[in-house]
Image (spheres, rainbow, N blue to C red):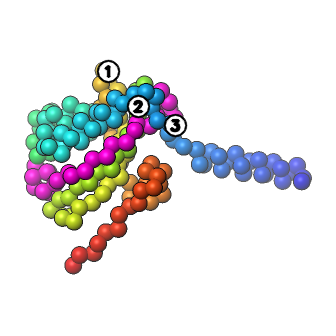
Amino acid sequence: MKLKTKIACSISFIMSLLINMQVYADECPSSDLPQNALTNYLEAMQERRFLDAFKFVSDSMTDGRSNKDWAELQEMFYTGGGVIIFGIDVRQAIAPISDIECASTAIVPNILKSRDNFNNQGITEFEIYTIVRRDDRWLIDSQETLFDQSDVDKWFPGETLPEFLDKK
């Protein structure tokens, strides 16, 4: 094999490794606190205890609103939209590459089952939450809903995005 070919193959191999590099590591070591914060938040939302749910979210999740203002807004959305959460499946916290000890950040996957006035057949949502430690408390800092099967495969192996029924 010529030197140029070997170099090209080596560069190709290294590039493929970099492209496919994970942005997360393994499960957080011996800590269930990040997923406990998410469980407490989702159960409070499920039970419409919005003042309690506020205790588990960061300012970025509330847009800087006060507890009272944020809770009133959530109540309006849930009541007006007829939101009902009937399934919560919080998974083990995962360490991002930038914090493999989960000292200040963790990624927590969740499968949420809910329905509302616009989707009365119910929906299964695959969610990824970023949980951060602030003042010795774990808080939900962001939430992402996955819509592509390849993303679901990465975070929820063996799970499948539901097919939507076209009800006319």
Determine whether, in the image, residue 107 is placed left or right of residue 138. right
Examine the rendering and report whether any part of residue 148 can be seen. Answer: no
Q: Earlier in the sequence, mark 2 or mark 1?
A: 2
Query: Label 2 vs label 3: CA separation?
Result: 12 Å
Which residue is the extreme one toward the bottom? 168
Q: Which mark is residue 38?
A: none
**Magenta span covers which residues?**
76-101
What label does residue 105 carry, if any? 2
Q: Nearer the viewer, residue 75 or 31?
A: 31
Q: Which numbered disc flags the more N-terminal residue, 2 or 3?
A: 3
Residue 143 sits in quarter: top left
Type of the residue with mark 3: Ala
Q: Amino acid at mark 1?
A: Asp
Q: Residue at x 21, y 41 (%)?
A: 43
Q: Position of residue 45 (x, y in %)?
A: 18, 43
Q: Nearer the viewer, mark 2 or mark 3?
A: 3
Which secondary structure, mark 1?
A: loop
Residue 86 picture location, percent across and down: 21, 52
Farthest residue to the top: give it. Answer: 135
Q: Is residue 3 visible?
A: yes
Mark 2 nearby-residue class (10 Å; few <14, some 14–19, many ≥20): many
Q: Which residue is mark 3?
A: 25
The kind of residue tagged 2 is: Thr
Where 127 sits versus 63, above or below?
Answer: below
Residue 128 x, y percent position in the rendering: 37, 45
Q: Is residue 138 left or right of residue 167?
A: right
Kindly state the secondary structure of the residue where label 3 is placed. Answer: strand
- Residue located beneath label 1 in the image: 136
| Badge count | 3
